[in-house]
Amino acid sequence: MTKKLLQQAARERPMLGDGAMGTQLMLAGLVQGNCGEEWNLSHPEKVLAIQRRYADAGSECIITNTFGGSAIMLGRHSQAGHAAAINKAGVEIARQAFGGRDGYVLGDIGPFGGLLAPFGEFTEDQVRSAFEEQAAALVEGGADAIIIETQTSLEELLIGIKAAQSAGAKCIIGSMAYDVTLDGSTFRTMMGIDPERAAEFMEENGAHIVALNCGTGMDMEHARIAVERYKQVTNLPVMVQPNAGKPRLENMKIVYDQTPEEMVKGLLPLLQAGANIVGACCGSTPEHIRAFRGVMDEFLKSREIEFRGAQRES
Ligand SMILES: [Zn+2]
């Protein structure tokens, strides 16, 4: 039996994503400011250990450790020449984390880390070729989907979507980082994009799943509101990865305060709003994902007939 596409599986019943990678890498000894993606080659066992904890906690979707894996980002660590190898290795490690069980590997493309010309130093061509190289390596490595994450501008998002398309990705996820406005009344990306506009844009341009991750102040409740706003303008499945609360500086280190118990309180409303894939972003841990698993299993049980029915139809 061929594996269902992620966008199909996610329509049939809600699925569980994974939690943070960056903060976990630092706990495993990565020095802040160093290149975590390079660990796919130099310390694969450490990356694997983190992702295995997520898989064991119940994650069905594991995101590769390739957030900063474009040649432009890697170039800041003199690793640009290893971009393809780092991305391929990232997919292999994430696949291994499932230990032979079914699961979806989401190949991660993060922002290139600058502004496009004329405001910034990189031309569209440079970003395109970096994203194309990364997407091709992720697809060649066997990723089930490409997620273009933490995006704030539609121009950069589009370059990512096109790169994923030209690499032949069967599932493309566009994920925006929103910031809650100062008065708390709404949220939009740093570049002023609101969720309705982002969702319409993604659908028009061929993304299969609309998503959000990270951002400022985007907790579980704001993620729920975003799910509702997305669903008002698109029928595509929705994926959310909120942060574990607001970042706070402690001894020059960024810390996130929301415990698994606090964060998981927001999960049921998110599922009731129709979120199709739920994971978590900065500050979350395998314990957060384990708590999510418990609530999601209860939710699935309570709606068993409905979800079974959906599976039969397909
Ligand atoms: Zn984050």
Image: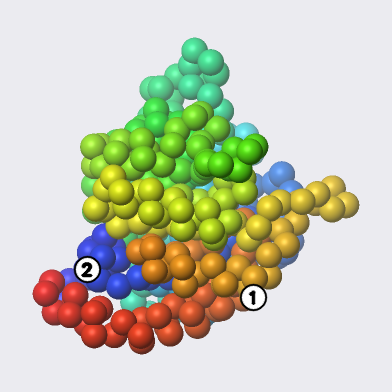
In this picture, residue 20 sits left or right of residue 298: right
Residue at 56% x, 78% y is 291
Query: Which amino acid type is shown beneath numbered disc 1?
Result: Glu
Indicate left or right for 75 with 204 as reference.
right
Quarter of the image for the N terminus: give it.
bottom left
Choose the circle earlier in sequence order: 1 or 2.
2
Q: Which mark is residue 4?
A: 2
Rendering quarter of residue 96: bottom left
Q: Residues within 10 Å of mark 1 (few under 14, many from 20)?
A: few
Residue matched to label 1: 261
| Residue at x-position 53% and y-position 15% | 119
The residue positioned 52% from the left and 41% from the top of the image is 187
Residue 38 visible in the current orientation: no
Q: Position of residue 272 (x, y in %)?
A: 39, 69
Q: Is residue 75 left or right of residue 248?
A: left
Three-letter amino acid code of the residue under disc 2:
Lys
Q: Nearer the viewer, mark 1 or mark 2?
A: 1
User: Residue farthest to the top?
Assistant: 118
Report how far apart the C-alphas of labels 1 and 2 lie in the structure. Answer: 32 Å
Q: How is the image coloured?
A: rainbow
Q: Which residue is nearer to you in this view: 36 or 229?
A: 229
Q: Locate residue 171, reporting x and y percent.
A: 28, 53
Question: In the visual, does 75 lie left or right of 158?
Answer: right
Give coordinates of residue 166: x percent, y percent.
Answer: 25, 39
Q: Residue 93's spot in the image, x, y percent?
A: 47, 65
Classify residue 216 by image quadrant: top right
Q: Is residue 15 visible?
A: yes
